[in-house]
Image: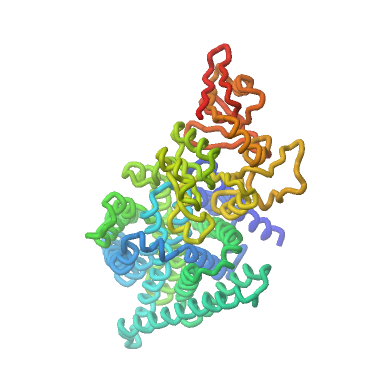
Amino acid sequence: MHNYALAIALIGALGVGAQWLAWRTGWPGIALMLAAGIIAGPVTGLVRPAEVFGPLLEPAVSIAVAVILFEGGLSLNFRELRKTEGAVMRLGLIGMPVGWVLGTLACYYIAGLVWPVAILFAGILVVTGPTVVLPLLRQSNIAARPRAILKWEAIVNDPFGALFAVITYEYLRRSGDGASLAGVTASILFAAIVAGVIGFAMAWAIKWAFPRGHVPEHLKAPVLFVAVIVTFVLSNLIQHETGLVAVTVMGVALANMKLSSLRDVHPFKENVTVLLISGVFVLLSASLDLDVARRFEWRFLAFLIALLFLVRPATVLVSLAFSKVPWRERILIAWIAPRGIVAVAMSGLFALRLGALGYGDGGILVTLSFGVVVATIVAHGFSIRWVARRLDVTATGQRGLLIVGATPWSLALARHLQQLEVAVTISDANWRALTGARQHGLSTFHGEILAETSEEHLDMGRFQALAAATPNEAYNALVCSEFAPEIGRDAVYQLGGGGGDSAPDDRGLSEALRGRSLFASGVGIDEIEARAAAGWTFRKTRISEQFDFAAARAALPAEADLLLVLRPGGQLRFFTHATRPVPVAGDVIVSYAPPQPRRDGAGAEVEAVA
């Protein structure tokens, strides 16, 4: 029992550790999780999933995939779908059948599989899946439209790829009893439709129960997760693999029902999904049998090359022909198609079933599926950023700063950062307050930042940090609390209420309810307004080997407050009442100082900008 607990702890540590390392290094997290699982499993033998979980391994992985698909469905808003120019529908209605046919030809003529096994495996290969695509998109900086297309495709085609494989298998199993392909297909599609109805009905039940107080707040997240599992299992009892259809429909339906209660469980739901993706990916890669890998043949390498450079590109280019999607975006989408958990799990499942039906090639599916997973994860994971940059399909510019509140102080800050080539957007619900920002060519967002419709018009992925600078401290805190789960608790800042380290204000808002206070002194809103009226200005100080941080601080007036550090790569680090970044050579310090400019004897640059 102790060894089992140790193995489970190790799986979690490896998965989350790989994602943390990906965050620190910028390497693709899915590739690091794959490597961690292979090292822990077949290489060192530290983790043996089959021994630890036994017969529970397959249902555990299936339920985890169901929860991941549901969470992905919750992120699919139909407003975002409209921005894809019909690409998602084309990739579904045209792309999946084309990919199935081309994949079948590659499996038969290149990999050497017999026709029945080639058709079934090609059906599985139309799946990309959120377990691999979502981590990849999270770490890349591609433009909004191809990002939305890849996300929708990954979540929507997951259950359909499973259905393709089920239809093929059921026909092979029933053909001896005289069943026709049309009859088998009709029965499975009917079961999928019933599963979709079950998923929608469960979503409607949650929408009805949550706002009416039938479920207390502390039980909403548990009830939601149990509902997902029940929906998945109940649908699978009708027809195997239709549970994926049910949970996807359930997630998409809830995402578009405008249920405010779901916003409260989003952080917990997303955290659980990260844990599931990490754990399941390590589990499956640790399950790889080196003896199976040794049976990998050279013709399989030719099959992988055909899959990467012929099947996927042809599928996408045929699907998006004559569409409004630009050619550069089509090429990026044609390249990105990593396979992951669903492909491996289903290949292993159907390998056993095909063997029972007398198809010897079924055993090769495990080898091929792991080959496809490794090849696509490595190829796409390490190349997506480079390809996106070469095609100029990255999000516009560096990730910048979102300032909420158009005040004289925030406008002066935005102008100063604009001169330092930092992307800044000022948001305010008052159109007239944004006049000065528009006159200086600054990016603006007119509207209530907390309104649900703001998500449709403002891509939060463009920002690395948020500064709430309205005259209302409580509103600033509300904005920071709302966007902390999306941008990061350590990347939302606000004016006022810090009180400084030396004199904390016990009567102020709790740290858990507010953003970090701008400036190390935690200066309040009233004092900032008084300083702005007195002519205080923002200044930049460049740090070099000869002019270090201590010298730069000494060159500033004693009353000056340090605001932030700008790294050479465009990264912003703020001085707050809780954090003190240490500038190094090449950094630029932005400070807020009294109007008298000053230079030290060495002529160091200390510039003021009104």
Q: Is residue 114 visible?
A: no
Q: Residue at x 64, y 48 (%)?
A: 473
**Residue 173 appears in which quarter of the rendering?**
bottom left
Q: Position of residue 305 (x, y in %)?
A: 31, 52
> Colour mode?
rainbow
Vertical position of residue 478 compared to residue 95: above or below: above
Q: How many circles with numbers are drawn on the protein? A: 0
Vertical position of residue 375 compared to residue 352: above or below: above
Q: Is residue 89 visible?
A: yes
The quarter of the rendered structure image containing the N terminus is bottom right
Q: Position of residue 12 (x, y in %)?
A: 61, 55
Q: Position of residue 520 (x, y in %)?
A: 66, 35
Residue found farthest to the left: 322
Instruction: Name the side, left or right, on which 155 lies relative to 485.
Output: left
Of 33 and 74, which appears nearest the observer?
74
Q: Residue at x 47, y 44 (%)?
A: 425
Residue found farthest to the top: 601
**Residue 274 appears in which quarter of the rendering?**
bottom right
Of 244 and 170, which appears nearest the observer?
244
Vertical position of residue 164 compared to residue 44: above or below: below
Of 583 and 500, which appears nearest the observer?
500
Q: Residue at x 35, y 87 (%)?
A: 177
Q: Position of residue 338 (x, y in %)?
A: 40, 55
Instruction: Name the side, left or right, on which 142 lies relative to 585.
Output: left
